[in-house]
Amino acid sequence: MIAEWEDIIIQTLCRFLIPFMQTYSLYVLVHGHSSPGGGFQGGCIMAACFILLVIAYDLNVAKRRFKEKINVIFCSLGVFIYAGTGWACLLLGGKFVDYGKLSLILPTDPIKARYYGMASIETGVEIAVMAIMISIFWDLVTAGKHEEAFKEEEDVGTNR
Amino acid sequence: MIKKAISIIIAIFAAAALLEGVRAFPKWADPYQPASLHVSPRYIEKTVEETAVPNMVTSVLADYRGYDTMFETSVIFTAGISVMMLLRRRPK
Amino acid sequence: MWEQIVSKYNYWIYVILIMIGFYGMMAKNNLLKKLIGMNIFQWALILYYISIGAKRGGTVPILSEEAGSPFEHLKAIQVINPLPHVLMLTAIVVGVATTGIALALLVIIYRRYGTLEEDEIIEELKRWKRL
């Protein structure tokens, strides 16, 4: 398990940096259309914010911020958004990922509707990648025993 | 010790086989190599008039080849589910 | 013969990296080092594939807006090939998935046998008459 470490410089810096990292990850996602970026890259940065929280603080602190049950819901929500957009195109009378047919719902022309279709699937990809990376990290760090990892251990060496 | 010697010999034979194939490759960064003459000129020239996105990598990944990206997302989803299945245990 | 090496030196570098990863997978005893060898193999293949799409004198495959016309118009020979980059994005994600599952299997093996060395595990299996 990850032992508790109290170092004032690292904890203050991480507390300061994590909101900026999350904003940067959303920036990379949205600007994927006109600069390098996209869904996968933003999802990795968002997962790195959470892993930084676990490394700087304790496992209990990180679990209070982002519960495990919500993470499992996010895993499937990302794939559902992606497949749902493709399925909506199918219902509106086109082929499977033919985003031009989304112009029947959105108030734009068929060429701009492909732009918005791409934006929605990149959001789905980011949510899925973030949730899966956090879930794999959780399972490997606690070696599967989620409930036992959060008991207070008195004889773990702390760096004071 | 014998395992490392045999491994080095096998690796050298495999490298020789691969480098024999490298002899038939075109030169590096040749503008007229066959890899950049068939499909990609269409993606490069028509990306703004067919999809209004100036980033060619995103438009190929999400629009022209969107079906592959959907299955890739399901691959990473399957990996997360299988790590959950292998490692999680109920507390006794 | 010298011209063969100089004009295609990127392929030589990637073949050497592939062989380093292959040697690591075959010759090392520890299971974690074999996994690192597999990772080196995989990243060398990804880099090799990306280097196919380079073009002499080509620019980045992102069009920029200008003041007058909406987007600049470039011919296909001035822009590097975007297709290998796209295909390798998928390959990177598949590599991450494979590494994650391999690490989970290593945790289970350690929990069962108490060691990660290959010869000790094979001796244990022979003692239980399963090999």
Image: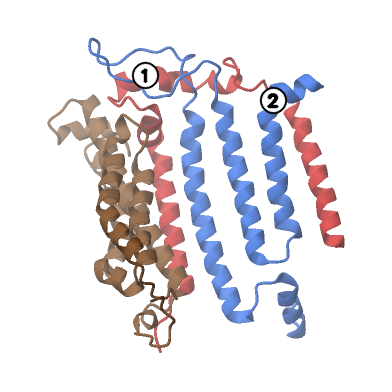
Chain colours: A brown, B red, C blue
Quarter occupied by the C terminus of chain C: bottom right
In this orientation, does residue A5 appear? yes
Q: Chain of mark 1?
A: B
In this orientation, does residue A86 appear? no
Quarter occupied by the N terminus of chain C: top right
Identified at 85% across, 49% down, the residue is B9
Q: Position of residue B34 (x, y in %)?
A: 60, 20
Residue type at the position of mark 1: Lys
Residue B29, picture quadrant:
top right
Identified at 71% across, 48% down, the residue is C20
Residue type at the position of mark 2: Lys
Q: Position of residue B28 (x, y in %)?
A: 63, 23
Residue C118, picture quadrant:
bottom right
Residue on which disc 2 sits:
C8
Residue on which disc 1 sits:
B46
Tell me the element at label 2.
loop
The correct choice, above or below, for B54 with respect to B90 in the image is above
Q: Position of residue A43 (x, y in %)?
A: 35, 49
Going by the image, does C36 lie left or right of C125? left
